[in-house]
């Protein structure tokens, strides 16, 4: 069943008013009509089963039939600080990272980032990025749309990390070295608890620099290896999110 994200301002008693691009999607793409059912997700993470009542040119009105007791969110809140990559790789990371449960994305202006985004350049890209995240959230039945931060340099990233309970960064040198409990991803996963706030830093194509690694370690980050193989920057975050999902949601799952 198709899902749409709404703000609390769009809810009035038992009626939901859907506006913007979602109207076009309902009426033109899905050919929605009165009587059809949809699911609406509020910005508080609640889901409601709704029935379309009226279809207008710029608005669709739906009535709430039932609030649903469901959640597709990870039991831990994961923020991906992604070293800004080349070309359209960031879009891929946003889309797939959303599907895998990331709660927030931070474009990280790393020392080895070839692509350089200032606030103006990021602002031009942000609308497309937000659309990718929203559509991926609907497709994967997320309860919330992940947050997209503005570009951060290392200093700002360290300030962001102060509110996190688990701080990790993928470090290529850890993958090259011998496996050990200190640097293994699995040991970090074993320490995770529900409601933890995880910040995972991924380097750009050239990886995290030695200086950045030292600063991160001094600030309480743990260097981890994501397997024995060297992953592309656009693969690393997805590997980590899949590992967190399996460990926290599937490993001890019982019907």
Image: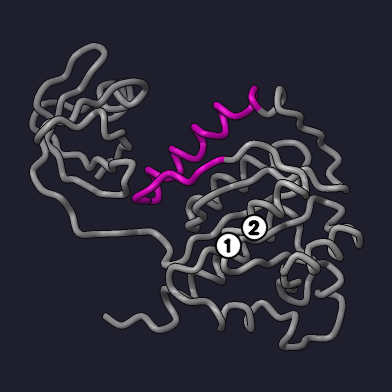
State the CA–CA distance, disc 2 to disc 1.
Answer: 5 Å
Left or right, 205 with respect to 30, comes to right
| Dot label at residue 161 | 2
Left or right, 66 with respect to 251, comes to left
Point out residue 117 in the picture as x, y percentages from the top left corner.
Answer: 76, 32
Q: At 33% across and 26% down in the image, what residue appears? A: 22
Task: Examine the structure image and report whether residue 138 is included in the region drawn in magenta.
Answer: yes
Q: Is residue 209 or residue 39 the one in the foreground?
A: 209
On screen, residue 234 above or below 117: below
Q: Quadrant of residue 116?
A: top right
Callout 1 environment at 10 Å: few (<14), some (14 to 19), or many (20+)?
Answer: some
Query: What is the chief secondary structure element of the magenta stretch?
Result: helix
Q: Which residue is mark 1?
A: 164
In this view, which residue lies farthest toward the right?
210
Q: Quadrant of residue 13?
A: top left
The region drawn magenta spans 123-148
In this view, which residue lies farthest toward the top?
57
- Whether tag 2 and tag 1 are in contact, CB under 8 A, the answer is yes
User: Label 2's element?
Assistant: helix
């Amino acid at each position: 069943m198709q899902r749409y994200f709404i703000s609390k301002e769009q809810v009035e008693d038992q009626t939901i008013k859907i506006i913007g691009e979602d109207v076009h999607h309902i009426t033109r793409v899905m050919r929605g009509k009165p009587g059809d059912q949809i699911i609406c997700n509020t910005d508080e993470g609640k889901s409601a089963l709704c029935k379309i009542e009226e279809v207008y040119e710029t608005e669709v009105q739906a009535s709430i039939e039932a609030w649903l007791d469901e959640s597709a969110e990870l039991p831990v809140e994961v923020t991906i600080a992604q070293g800004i990559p080349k070309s359209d790789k960031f879009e891929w990371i946003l889309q797939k990272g959303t599907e895998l449960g990331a709660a927030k994305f931070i474009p990280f202006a790393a020392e080895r980032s070839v692509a350089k985004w200032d606030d103006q350049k990021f602002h031009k890209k942000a609308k497309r990025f937000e659309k990718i995240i929203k559509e991926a959230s609907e497709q994967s039945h997320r309860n919330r749309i992940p947050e997209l931060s503005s570009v951060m340099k290392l200093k700002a990233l360290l300030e962001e990390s102060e509110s996190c309970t688990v701080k990790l960064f993928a470090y290529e040198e850890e993958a090259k070295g011998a496996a050990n409990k200190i640097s293994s991803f699995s040991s970090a996963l074993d320490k995770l608890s529900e409601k933890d706030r995880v910040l995972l830093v991924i380097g750009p194509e050239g990886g995290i620099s030695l200086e950045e690694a030292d600063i991160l370690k001094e600030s309480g980050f743990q260097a981890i290896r994501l397997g024995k193989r060297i992953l592309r920057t656009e693969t690393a975050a997805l590997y980590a999110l899949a590992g967190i999902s399996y460990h926290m949601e599937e490993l001890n799952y019982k019907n």
